[in-house]
């Protein structure tokens, strides 16, 4: 019986696709729920690559959506539109926030996020 885990690679093309639908498919793949050997306490040995990340379809209301972050100090709540984040940091930050928000908040999330490769 061969119980070796082989590293699997998945490639997603984001050209003309919806951000949320793609992010949910990518999160399911990073978590390993598309495999018959799914275990919730083990991060699978997969690599997910997103090609054409900058060609995702975003309408005006999606570009005006805001990201929030809080410093922990009084008056430390900061707002930034998605459009401004894209200008400042590129589309990688948008994909990382979308996929990270769809993964479970536990010790495996940083491990799964390291297996995400974004090509603009």
Image (cartoon, grey):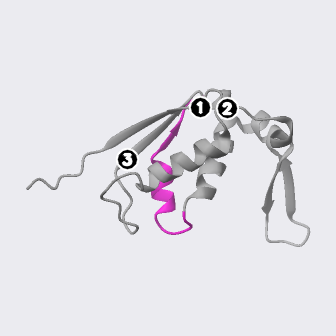
Circle nearer the N terminus (3, 2): 3
Location of mark 3 (residue):
46
Q: Residues within 10 Å of mark 2 (few under 14, many from 20)?
A: some
Circle nearer the N terminus (1, 2): 1
Location of mark 1 (residue):
14
Magenta span of residues:
104-120
Q: What residue is drawn where x is 71% and y is 32%?
A: 57
Q: What residue is drawn where x is 81% and y is 35%?
A: 59
Q: What residue is drawn where x is 62% and y is 27%?
A: 15
Location of mark 2 (residue):
56
Marks 3, 1: nearer the viewer: 1
CB atoms of marks 3 and 1 within 8 Å:
no
Q: Is residue 87 left or right of residue 37?
A: right
Marks 3, 2: nearer the viewer: 2
Q: Judging from the image, what secondary structure is the residue with disc 1 in?
A: loop
How far is disc 3 from disc 1 in space, using C-alphas? 19 Å
How far is disc 1 from disc 2 in space, using C-alphas? 5 Å
CB atoms of marks 1 and 2 within 8 Å:
yes
Residue 88, percent from left and from top = 77, 37
């Amino acid at each position: 019986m061969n119980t070796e885990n082989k590293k699997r690679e998945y490639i997603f093309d984001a050209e003309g696709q919806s951000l949320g639908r793609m992010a949910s498919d990518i999160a399911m793949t990073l978590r390993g729920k598309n495999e018959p050997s799914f275990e919730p306490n083990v991060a699978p040995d997969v690599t997910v690559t997103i090609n054409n990340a900058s060609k995702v379809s975003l309408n005006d209301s999606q570009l005006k959506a805001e990201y929030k972050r809080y410093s922990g100090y009084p008056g430390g709540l900061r707002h930034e539109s998605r459009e401004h984040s894209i200008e400042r940091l590129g589309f990688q930050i948008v994909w990382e926030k979308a996929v990270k928000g769809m993964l479970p908040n536990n010790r495996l999330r940083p491990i799964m996020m390291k297996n995400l490769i974004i090509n603009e």
